[in-house]
Image (spheres, rainbow, N blue to C red):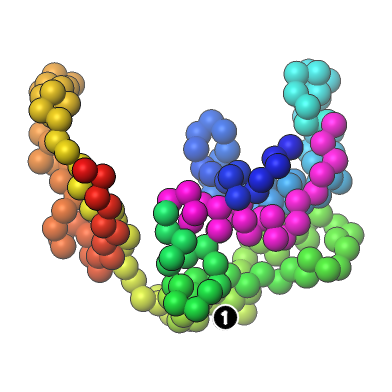
Amino acid sequence: MMKDPMRCYITTDHPNAGPFTRYPRVIKWLMSTKAREAQINAFKHKDKVLSQTSIGSLDREISLYELAQMTRAGPAKSLGLTSMCGGLKPGMDADVAVYNFNPDQPVANPDDIEKAFSRCSHVFKSGVQVVTNGEIVSNGHKRTLWVNAKVKENPQVMRDINEKFLKYYSMTQANYEALGHHFVPNPYTIEVDAT
């Protein structure tokens, strides 16, 4: 039902989705009406599901291009990271996943979609090939992305947070510190000035 795949993302947010290991199955449902119908027919209370939702009337099958927008370009744009990821322009991070899937050929069996997206054929991380023919060949360039957000501190908010820690937690705020190289190995800092 989406009109703009750049603003619709697959997430692991509970209870709206599921673990990322199920992405290939979700992708199969998004790309195949036949797969969706098979899942709907497997529901124990199929009639109730169909009467309470519009899922039975959906016949759209998203394309590989739309999937790339939903899983790469769109999230990168929403996070303000389009200069480094979410595309293939020169100067970007060169994080590329290659799947054994040809979008120009009709899919006879929807399970082939799930199989293709369950195991990358090739993966490049920061331009280094880390997966070849489905096998891990390198750990690539490791780094930890973190945001250093500069904000105006609000004394009332800080006081409220301190009170909540004292009242509800068995540890102090110092236990949640995320700065320092011992917490963030191979840091790649994204600076944000929100003051």
Residue density around tag 1, few if under 14, some if 14–19, many if 20 or more, within 10 Å: some
Q: Which residue is mark 1?
A: 132
- Which residues are the magenta region? 57-79
Residue 17 percent location from the top left of the image:
58, 38
Pick whichever, 159 or 143, lies toward us.
159
Residue 49 percent location from the top left of the image:
76, 23
Residue 32 percent location from the top left of the image:
81, 49
- Residue 126 falls left or right of residue 192: right
Query: Is residue 136 in view from this perspective?
Result: no
- Residue 33 falls left or right of residue 122: right
Residue sitting at 85 percent across and 57 percent down? 109
Residue 187 percent location from the top left of the image:
25, 65
Residue sitting at 53 percent across and 44 percent down? 11
Residue sitting at 82 percent across and 36 percent down? 58
Amino acid type, label 1: Thr
Which image quarter: residue 98?
bottom right
Pick whichever, 89 or 171, lies toward us.
89
